[in-house]
Image: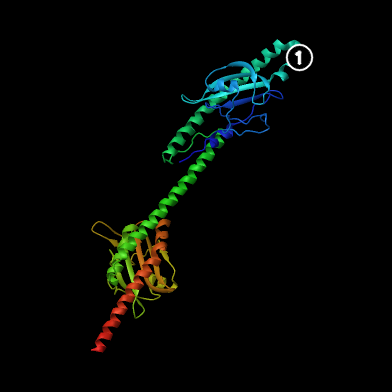
Amino acid sequence: MHIDPADFIEPMLHTGGGLGETGEVMLVDQDVTILTSLRHTLANGNSPEPLKFKIKTGPAQFAARGEEGITESEDYRGKQVLAAYRHLRITSETGWGMVVKRDVSEIFAPFKEALVRSIVITVFGLFLVIALITVITRKITGPVLNLTRIVEQVEKGNLKHKAEDITGDEIGTLALSFNRMIDRMNDTREKDRRNEWLKTGKNELNYTMSGNPDISELADNIVRFLAEYLDAKLGALYLINDTQMLELEGSYAFTGPVDFSGKIAIKEGLAGQAAYTQKRILLTDVPKDYVRISSTAVDAVPKMLIVMPIIYEDESIGVLELASLKEFSEKDLEFLDYVIESIAVALYSAQSRLKMKALLKVSGQNGN
């Protein structure tokens, strides 16, 4: 994963004020790349961008490699300046160079007779600025180090860490932006995982439905796979027979009422209504006498029941029922919507094969 350093540094960058018409404060990294926007344009009129321009002036290079002092030299415009420079240690491995400079002409022009006093006052003021920036730097080092550690975790693929103790300054704004970025990355990762889960389930279901099994075997395979994949504890699959009745063809841990014949009329009960309206039914208040989930260890009413019509070319051909001791999640319902068409095609194909075999058998008997 690539993290752009500019996203972290740019909100902190600023050019110093209170240094006259020509003075400015510059920050550079260890490679002498500028971290602040320059106050003036270069000699050629261009305005370099922070984090993209290496400055070649002496004070900046001295500060970047760990030195400090005061000197008179040419700046990036080719102007003679008086510059104070020093190295700011940010972490044990990272340091910045700071240069505070002002044009010599501006410093000495107004009062040549007070040259010495003016220099002393200016230099004193510059070092006050240095001291202030040092204090501020130490104050922001903690949040910056915290962000650095989080970035390292993100680079390793760990998106559980987020910036804490967010302040109300620029660093706090940066931390909030970074947290939002992590949230977006988590959302993307979760969406990818969800899509992968959907595709994997559909591929496994298609494999389960392959091989041209008969209707009963196919229905059993379908309802068993769905019950196990969605952690449902009970399932039933009905198909509409030649008498336009829903007939139980496949089941998983299903035991109907004592007087249940295995057939349901269209419009009758939840299954009949789902087949008639061609709409999914979700039931969270399951009647005690409708269906129960039973085993040697458990005898309970389901927490949720889902009844889905199986539709092929706009006609209902069957109904799928799944019951669970927990509520089905949005992801579970999305999966059922995702695979129900494939289930309908497989069941219709199996019905067509069965009808074809019956016709061939009748045709053979007539021929004899």
Q: Nearer the viewer, residue 101 or 315?
A: 101
- Where is residue 210, by image quadrant? bottom left
At label 1, the amino acid type is Phe
Q: Residues within 10 Å of mark 1 (few under 14, many from 20)?
A: few
On the picture, is 355 further left or further right than 338? left
On the picture, is 113 further left or further right than 82? right
**Quadrant where the image shows the N terminus:** top left
Q: Nearer the viewer, residue 266 or 229?
A: 229
Q: Against 358, is 258 above or below?
A: above
Residue at (43% x, 49% y) in the render: 190
Residue at (61% x, 26% y) in the render: 26
Q: Against 300, is 4 above or below?
A: above
- Spot occupied by residue 295 in the image (x, y as percentages of width and height): 25, 59
Q: Nearer the viewer, residue 145 or 21?
A: 21
Report if residue 168 is visible in the image. Answer: no
Q: Against 100, is 164 above or below?
A: below
- Spot occupied by residue 252 in the image (x, y as percentages of width and height): 29, 64
Q: How many marks?
A: 1
Report if residue 296 is visible in the image. Answer: yes
**Quadrant where the image shows the C terminus:** bottom left
Q: Nearer the viewer, residue 16 or 267?
A: 16
